[in-house]
Amino acid sequence: MRPIVEYEPMDRATFEREIVPKGEPAVFRGLVADWSVVRAGQAGPQSLAQMLRDAATDEPIQVWFGPPEIEGRFNYDAELSGFNFERKLATVDQLLELLLRQLGHEKPYSMYAGGIPIPKHLPSLVSAIPVNMLDMTRETLISLWIGNRTHTTTHWDQSQNLACVVAGRRRFTLFPPKELKNLYVGPLDFTLAGQPTSLVNIDAPDLETYPQFTEALKTAQRAELDPGDALYIPALWWHDVLSLQDFGSLINFWWRDAEPPLLSPIYALYHAVITLKDLPPNELAAWRNMFDHYVFGDNGDPVVHLPEPARGILRQRTPELVARVKKLLSDALSS
C-alpha cells in the first residue's frame, strides 16, 4: 500500500493553508511527543494508567468487551442482527485495572473504550494536551481511546480528525471517500458506533464474497504510528485502525469547517433513501438535477437572482433559520 505522506510539525497557518485544502491524509511525526501523557506512556502502562486515573472522574463510560476468539476485531455477528461483543458501563479506573491485569496474557479478552469526552471524564487533562496546529477556539470534540490489541473496522467520520497516539503502536489504513462502492458497507442505521462500517476484514479479505475490494486496495494508504505521532484524517475518509500492542491509548480532535449549528448530513441521507430511492428513473434524474443545482452548486449560486428577503431557506444560515427548517421537517414527518 502507498505510505501516507509525512510532514514535519507545523504551525496552524501552514496547516490550514497547505494541508487541509488538499483533502489528503498526513502524518506528523513527533507532533505531540512533549505531552506529559505520552512521556508517562513511555515509562510503561502502569505509569500512564496512574496519570489517567488521577485525571479521571467517577462518571461511567461505555466499554466494549469481546471474548478472546474475536482477537480484538469488534464487529457484527454472522447474521448482521447483533454484535460479537457486549457493551457495559465502567469507570476509567475500572477499565484501566482490567487492562493492566491482562498484560502479557496469551489470549486476552478484547477491551476497548472509544470516544471518551475528555472535558467531561478527564477534565484536568485538557490543559496538558495542547496542539498549536489546531484552532482550539472553534467547537472541537476532544476524546480519549483506550484498549488492548483491538481492530477498529473500516469506517468514516463526518468531521476532520487529528488522531494523536499516546501509547502503543497503531496501524492506520485509509481509503478515499470515492471507494464507498468497493468497501461493501454494512447497514446504514444499525451500526457498531454510529458510523456505517465495511464488512471486509482488510487483513484477510474474502475476495469471493467481496471481489471489488481489490479495487479499493489500489487506492489504500497506510502508516504505522508511534507514541507522539499524529495523523490528520480528512472528513469522510474511510479508516481502519489496528492497535499493535497489549496496552494502547490515543487522543483525537474532531472539528468541522461548517457554520453552526452543526447538523449531521447523515439524516438527510436517511430521508433521501426513503423518499427518492424507488422513484421512476426519469423522476430520479430530475431530482438529481435539483440536488446538483440547490445543494452541490453545480450551476453557481442558485438564488443570486433573488433579493435576500426572498431567498427563503436558501438565504444565509442563522440559528433562527435552522430552527424554522427543523420545525418544517418535524411537522411534515409527524403528519
Image (cartoon, grey):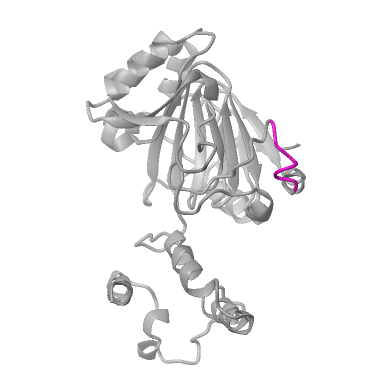
Q: Position of residue 119 (x, y in %)?
A: 29, 37
Q: Which residues are magenta?
A: 204-211
Q: Is residue 210 magenta?
A: yes
User: Does residue 44 appear left or right of residue 176 in this picture?
Assistant: left
- In the image, 93 versus 106, the foreground residue is 106
Q: Is residue 63 above or below residue 237?
A: above
User: Does residue 98 appear left or right of residue 278 in this picture?
Assistant: left
Q: Is residue 265 above or below residue 320?
A: above
Quadrant of the rendered image containing residue 313: bottom left
Query: Farthest residue toward the front?
Result: 79
Q: Is residue 177 magenta?
A: no
User: Does residue 284 appear left or right of residue 99 in this picture?
Assistant: right
Quadrant of the rendered image containing residue 286: bottom right
Q: Which residue: 29% across, 23% down?
A: 55
- The image quadrant where one finds the N terminus is top right
Q: Main secondary structure of the magenta part?
A: loop
- The image quadrant where one finds the C terminus is bottom left
Q: Which residue: 55% across, 78% down?
A: 279
- In the image, 211 versus 35, the foreground residue is 211
Tell me, yes or no, if residue 165 can be seen here: yes
Q: Position of residue 317 (x, y in %)?
A: 37, 73
